[in-house]
Amino acid sequence: MAKYVVATVDEIPPGKHKLTTVSNRRIGVFNIDGAFFALRNRCPHQGGPLCQGRILGHLVSEQPGEYRYDASRWTIRCPWHGWEFDVSSGQSWWDPERTRVPTYPVTIEDSGEKSDLVRGPYLAETYRVSVDRQSIVVEI
């Protein structure tokens, strides 16, 4: 999988998101209480701009008339027709086995870190660089 830097951590504060294009895919990157998630910005129903929809908490019911709020799970609702998907997995609530939105792994990495490069036979003069921000990286 290729990695793409899409933003710095401070560019997407908690409760906000950023739309970006990665490898010809329109993707929404969300910060929900400090956890980052990336979803395809296309509802499978009719291609609506899913990532422009509302983020909602999740209600759980063990029996009729009793509900509790689950703050660990989040739903995104398509603004066109209201189809809902789990932000972390992309699964739909009505048909989780067959209807889903593509999600992408998100990591937080120190900017400028090049751990996957192989040292070559030629060396150039280098200078120490310090980085004080972290970047949000999406893998596709």
Image (cartoon, rainbow, N blue to C red):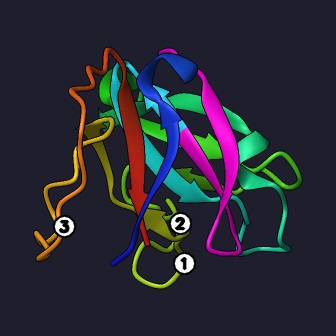
In the image, which disc is placed on residue 114?
none
Q: Main secondary structure of the magenta part?
A: strand
Mark 2 and 1 residues: CB-CB less than 8 Å, in contact?
yes
Nearer-N-terminus badge (2/3): 2
Q: Which range of residues does the magenta coloring cover?
A: 12-29
How many residues crowd around disc 1 within 10 Å: few (fewer than 14), some, or many (20 or more)? some
- Which kind of residue does numbered mark 2 sit on? Trp
Nearer-N-terminus badge (2/1): 2
In three-dimensional space, the C-alpha distance between marks 1 and 3, rounded to whole angstroms, equals 38 Å
Nearer-N-terminus badge (1/3): 1
Q: Which residue is mark 1?
A: 99
Q: Is residue 87 visible?
A: no
Q: Which residue is mark 3?
A: 117
Residue under the image location 31 percent in, 40 percent down: 112
Residue 66 percent across, percent down from the top left: 35, 23
28 vs 97, left or right, is right
Q: Secondary structure at mark 1?
A: loop
18 vs 114, left or right, is right
- Which kind of residue does numbered mark 1 sit on? Thr
Q: Nearer the viewer, mark 1 or mark 3?
A: 3
Residue under the image location 48 percent in, 85 percent down: 98
Q: Which residue is mark 2?
A: 94
Q: Is 27 part of what is drawn in magenta?
A: yes
Residue 62 percent across, percent down from the top left: 25, 37
Q: As rendered, which of 57 and 64 lies closer to the eye? A: 57
